[in-house]
Image (spheres, rainbow, N blue to C red):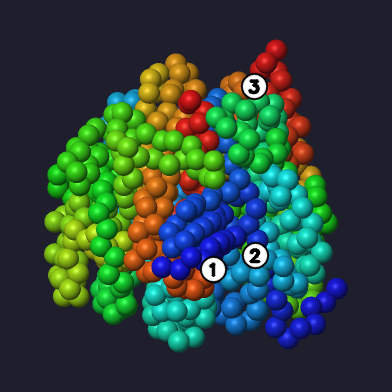
Amino acid sequence: MSDRTININVPVLARVEGEGALDLRIENGSITDLRLRIFEPPRLFEKFLEGRHYSEVPDIVTRICGICPVAYQMSAVYALEQLFNTEVTPWINAMRRVYYCGEWIESHALHIHLLAAPDFLGFENAPAMAKQFPAEVRRGLRLQGLGNQLIKLFGARSVNPIGVKVGGFHKAPDEATVAALVERLRTALPDAKALIEWLATLDFPQREQAFISVSLRHPLEYPINMHDTTLCSSTGHNIAINVFEYYFKESQVPHSTALHCHLEGKPYLVGPLARLNLNHEQLHDEVKQALADTGFTFPSHNPYHNIIARAAEIYYALLEAVRLLEDYQQPTAAAVEVTPKAGTAYGCTEAPRGTLWHRYEIDDHGIISAARLVPPTSQNQARIEADLHSSLQVLGLDNDETTLRQHAEQVIRNYDPCISCATHFLDLTVTRN
Amino acid sequence: MRITNNRPTVAVHKFTSCDGCQLAILNLEEELLTLAELVEIKQFAEAGILDEHAEVDIAFIEGSITTPREMEHIKKIREQSRYLIAMGACATSGGIQALRNMHDGQAWIDEIYASPQHIESLTTSTPLSDHVRIDLELWGCPVSGRQVTAAIRALLFGVLPKTEHDKVCLECKRSQAVCVMVSRGEPCMGPVTNTGCGALCPQFGRGCYACYGPAENPNPNALANRFEGLGMTADEIARNFLFINNSAPVFHTIGQKYSDRHDE
């Protein structure tokens, strides 16, 4: 061990969504300070949700995150409908699943190709990587585009989509449009399989770590939306959505505008790898086979396998969208009637980056009096810092600063942190205290 | 002012925002790779390209100004950029987060933070034009990829792009959508809102909520009167104007008027 003191300061984390930084101090061969610093300015969403009508919520919460607006809309509408005892039709539930599949495909393809893969292959960024891997990058951008098309089918645009309302959708797409898109989805299935095979050839560091996985679970299907789901962990939790706050607690740390969330005092993982660890058996056979053929087994405790989990979920989401759309019939009504009532609404769905939990207090006039949103990145923060401690030790703290910095950045990107989301959320929680 | 380089330089900077307008670029698919050939991207943190202090021909700015650091940072970017383009509702009007401007911003922050000493935040959210000179504003929440590539293309030819100032109503008519206000009595902000979105909301059978900001020569009073005629309360009318572009002066004035009426 050396007795040198190293300060590594990454002032702006590139290839993540939002503004974050990393401070690392190594003294006499051990880490004395390690902080994933989030300085994204807060926007105070929880405050301006107050006083708004419940029907405005789907158009407000999309603005929290440009990259996962569908997730925010879905956690919100399921929460409100459950409070209002609104029974949506099987068609609405199925199409919401398709809509959400679009966001998984878009977000995962963007993360794999534009944010994460350059780390594995030694490029500074995706345009540079595209010069040497043009076919792979173009395939990735095509998949991302296809995800966006699915979102547009129900949302008119892929960022801040406008098609969702409490009770269903504003409009049901016509059959010809759906049939044309299903053809494109089918054509992309080999691309999704090839993506898994390509990623399997990357160099994966051996970084087995003990951690808790958390995700929704559904008795029959891979978890996406909230109906008939419970929140589960790899340590045996199986809880209802509305008791989340009894088990999951947050604390403020001075270096972050986002809170750290713990499950009964312990850091935990949410997101694609956690979902795959807890729900592998619910994947389509084609996806299981593709994973088996490339030698990956789940549960996995190597955080680098997050990128494989993302690719597996792209393949799953494509298959699922085809399954749900192939016999598509345009319904007479795209939404059901909603009668608001006062009370507390709880919602939880699986955003691309992991579990997204919402709570709203509604008054007699259907007006929001309080809101709390717990995004995945807040939940993963403590796990990311734990991973960094472990990974940098395994790598060897004697490495030069460039190596340590690059390694730390890659570790953080494995979690696909979305700092725009996380910061919001912070505000909410502190308000409650 | 002309761009003389063969391959102009471009920067994308983020201020207080949701990252959605940057996605207008990252969602260009194949065109993204073409764009990376046409121009030299010097700064775009989300895409992994970092050179915050690079002098560039075109700087796209997403987000509003909400911290002391951002107030200083935008001035530096102005100095090092030939064309400065405000991209999206946050940059052009302060965004949805400008709702804090109408309340006691300091009280909000004090209420929210257990340890406010760790948080550096202004009590207001303001558009870039309150702080520096802007060469071009691209309105929208979010802007579309088409707006961004059209702007770059025009600047490559040495001209500022032509921006649309029609109202959403005109585009709605041209798309042959059914007017939701006439047919169903549903409130729609189309008569006072700038087009550019493609009149998406009326085509989906719902009212426009003004995410592209005020149109040229709007008549918000007439629209508010119409809303009253539909039976809407003062508070509901205020909320329609005080939404995504709540601090755009035209919307702010009328929204505040109805908001005050509610308080009486």
Residue type at mark 2 is Val
Label disc, if present, on residue A23 of the rendered structure: none
What is the chain identity of the residue bearing mark 1?
B
Residue B88: x percent and y percent? 65, 54
**Sequence-earlier tag: 2 or 1:** 2
Tell if the residue under mark 2 belongs to the same chain as the one under mark 1. Answer: yes
Q: Nearer the viewer, mark 3 or mark 1?
A: 1
The reply to whether the C-beta atoms of the residues labelled 2 and 1 are less than 8 Å apart is yes
User: How many residues crowd mark 2 within 10 Å: few (<14), some (14–19), many (20+)?
Assistant: many
CA separation in Å, label 2 and label 3: 40 Å
**Sequence-earlier tag: 3 or 1:** 1
Looking at the rendered structure, the secondary structure element under dot 2 is strand
What is the chain identity of the residue bearing mark 2?
B
Residue A266: x percent and y percent? 31, 42
What is the chain identity of the residue bearing mark 3?
B
- Position of the N terminus of chain A, as image quadrant, is bottom left
| Label total for image | 3
Q: Which residue, as the protein is rendered here, is positioned at the far right? A: B1
**Residue A385 seen in render:** yes
CA separation in Å, label 3 and label 1: 45 Å
Residue bearing mark 3: B234
Q: In which quarter of the view is residue A247 placed?
A: top left
Label disc, if present, on residue B47 of the rendered structure: 1
Looking at the rendered structure, the secondary structure element under dot 1 is helix
Residue A70: x percent and y percent? 41, 49
The reply to whether the C-beta atoms of the residues labelled 3 and 1 are less than 8 Å apart is no
Query: Residue sitting at 32 percent across and 77 percent down?
Result: A203
Residue type at mark 3 is Ala
Query: Residue sitting at 37 percent across and 69 percent down?
Result: A395
Residue bearing mark 2: B12
